[in-house]
Amino acid sequence: MRPVPELKAHAAGLPYLGYVLGTSQNGVLLSRHGAVPVRVPDANRFAAHKLLVSQLRTNDSTKSIEDLQQAALVIGFPGEHHPGSIEEACEAFPTSARNRVKRAVAPLERLLDAHPAALDEVREALAD
């Protein structure tokens, strides 16, 4: 565990946490005991971050594939219905992350067959 100033707490380290929390929104965590207000990452940044994390996992290909599948699931809808949102999230990547994320585009292609506009956005955002 290490200090995470963005959360004012201690947590397990997550690469590029500042990026994924760069834009967030209010949400509610519901349970049978009540409701708690929470801040959740913007879905577009969350999905783009999943692309990045899939390429950072060097010793667990199962988790890497799972990260790509989760990213594709979240990217599909906004990529088709909110043009520019995925591109904006990808363009906000720190320079140090861009090359790693670019490696995720090829495996992402087969997962986004049904969402060509979303795939085009990712490609355009990560083009040099």
Image (cartoon, helix red, strand yellow):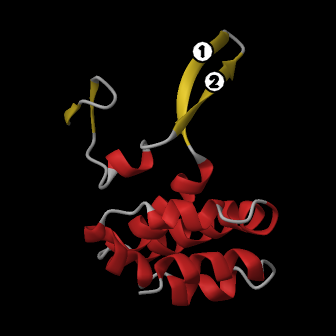
Q: Determine which residue is flagged by label 2.
A: 29
**Nearest the camera: 89 or 7?**
89
95 sits to left or right of 104: left
Q: Amino acid at mark 1?
A: Val
Where in the figure is residue 42, as x and y percent of width and height? 57, 45
**Nearest the camera: 58 or 46?**
46
**Nearest the camera: 94 or 13?**
94
Decide: few, some or many residues near mark 2? Use Cα within 10 Å; few <14, some 14-19, many ≥20.
few
Mark 1 or mark 2: name the one nearer the start of the chain: 2
Q: Quadrant of residue 69?
A: bottom right
Where in the figure is residue 102, as x and y percent of width and height? 43, 82
What is the number of the mark on residue 57? none
Which part of the image, by quadrant, shows the N terminus? top left
105 sits to left or right of 30: left
Which residue is rendered at x = 58% and y = 76% of the image?
Answer: 122
What is the number of the mark on residue 36? 1
Question: Secondary structure under badge 1?
Answer: strand
Question: Secondary structure under badge 2?
Answer: strand
**Nearest the camera: 108 or 34?**
108
Which residue is rendered at x = 73% and y = 60% of the image?
Answer: 78
77 sits to left or right of 8: right
Pointers 1 and 2 in contact (C-beta within 8 Å): yes
Q: Amino acid at mark 2?
A: Leu
Q: Is residue 34 above or below residue 56?
A: above
Q: Quadrant of residue 96?
A: bottom left
Alpha carbon distance from label 1 to label 2: 5 Å
